[in-house]
Amino acid sequence: MAFWSRWFKADQKAYGSEELWRDLYARGVSSTGIDVNWKSALQCEVAFACARVIAQGLSGIPFRLMKAQGNTREPASEHRLYGLLEDAPNDFMTSVEMFDTIGLHLVFCGNAYLIKNNLGRDLYELIPVEPGKVAVSNDRGTLSYKVSFDDRTAQTFAADRIWHIRGPSWNGWMGLEGVALAREAIGLSLAAETHGASTFSNGAQLGGILSTEQNLSPEQRNALRASWQAVHGGSDNAGKIAVMSNGFKFSPMSSTNVDAQWLESRKYQVEEVCRVFGVMPIMVGYSDKAATYASAEQMFLAHVVYTLGPWHRRVEKSAAVSLLSEQERKDGHYFKFFTQALLRGATKDRGEFYQTLYNVGALNPNEIRELEDRNPYDGGEIFRVQSSMVDPTKPEPVTNAPT
């Protein structure tokens, strides 16, 4: 008990996913002055594109309950959870929609929560809950979840009633909020977008001063400003020639977008936001001129392996622990994302890799089939090598030797 008392207090504060790291980061306002949260992050095209790519990497491929018996792996189609996660987790969502939601919650909020509705001992429904409506309490290692509903009621659930999927975590029981960690990168990207929109709404030339030696009344100054804006303001008037008279002079007061390297800044922010979320820029539509078809194919493969792979593994293990009983796991049940469809572009490379290892006796056919999630066949466990190959440590038998 002394161990837990050092880490958790009896009056441990309950946090929602939007509140958990607010105490650490003090506030949600970035250095640009823009308030960055999951809602504003959705308005950042690069951040939303990164979240969408990861979410679709979860929802766009089959997620199935499997059962391993010896060397045989078969879909556990008779199990209740198979149809629940393959087709429809509840009455108003498909499994694709559920994993889309889970993906967005994990990327932006670091946590995804689903209420497990049970009928007796059987799980018959999974209902996603917005992370901001869940407050998690940790009482000496025992988690509980207070869920606020739209009708302003709340209910506290024990840990066994919630499927809690965590992103990368600092304390082990709450995922780090992605938007909070990427606040400055997202804030700067939003500021660059706002600056561009403001520039085009006020004309291609940035603000300046109309000056004259004449004495103008306030009404004349306002009328002059309105007249100038009507003729030269807005994107439709960009590039028009100004005609000055009566001694008026126009002096620009700020640099152009070229001087401010606005375009270069926007390109860099694409890479910066992608770096935070672990997504390759080519996956959100950004690529430099040096990219070739061959290099792009490798980038797509790297996306599956290094970006989606860890998320797949995280969800698979979380589902196994939260949705399956210990006995079911011992009986060989497990969850798996089937990524073969995403790797079709690398089929030729995989075939050559398997063939090379097969020819030197490093893999047998059944081991290759296992790597491709296919069942073994009788005789496939035999290792084979090319018949012309011999053991270099043993001399070949000499034939027709003289007596």
Image: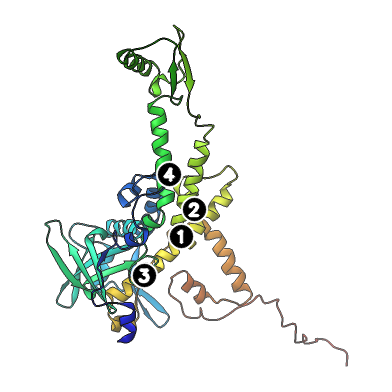
Instruction: Answer with mark 2 or mark 4, whichever residue precedes in sequence.
Output: 4
Residue displayed at 37% across by 27% down? 201
Q: What residue type is labelled 4?
A: Ser
Q: Which amino acid does label 3 sit on?
A: Glu
Percent of width and height locating residue 328: 29, 81
Q: Which mark is residue 316?
A: 3
Percent of width and height locating residue 143: 26, 74
Position of 335 with respect to 359 (left or right) is: left
Task: Quickly name the residue at label 1.
Answer: 307
Q: What kind of element bears circle 2? A: loop
Instruction: Answer with mark 2 or mark 3, whichever residue precedes in sequence.
Output: 2
Position of 79 with respect to 260 (left or right) is: left
Up/down of 246 relative to 156, above or below: above
Front residue of 290 and 376: 290
Q: Which of marks 3 and 4 is in front?
A: 4
Task: Quickly name the residue at label 2.
Answer: 280
- Crowd around label 4: few <14 · some 14–19 · many ≥20 (10 Å): many
Residue displayed at 45% across by 26% down? 206
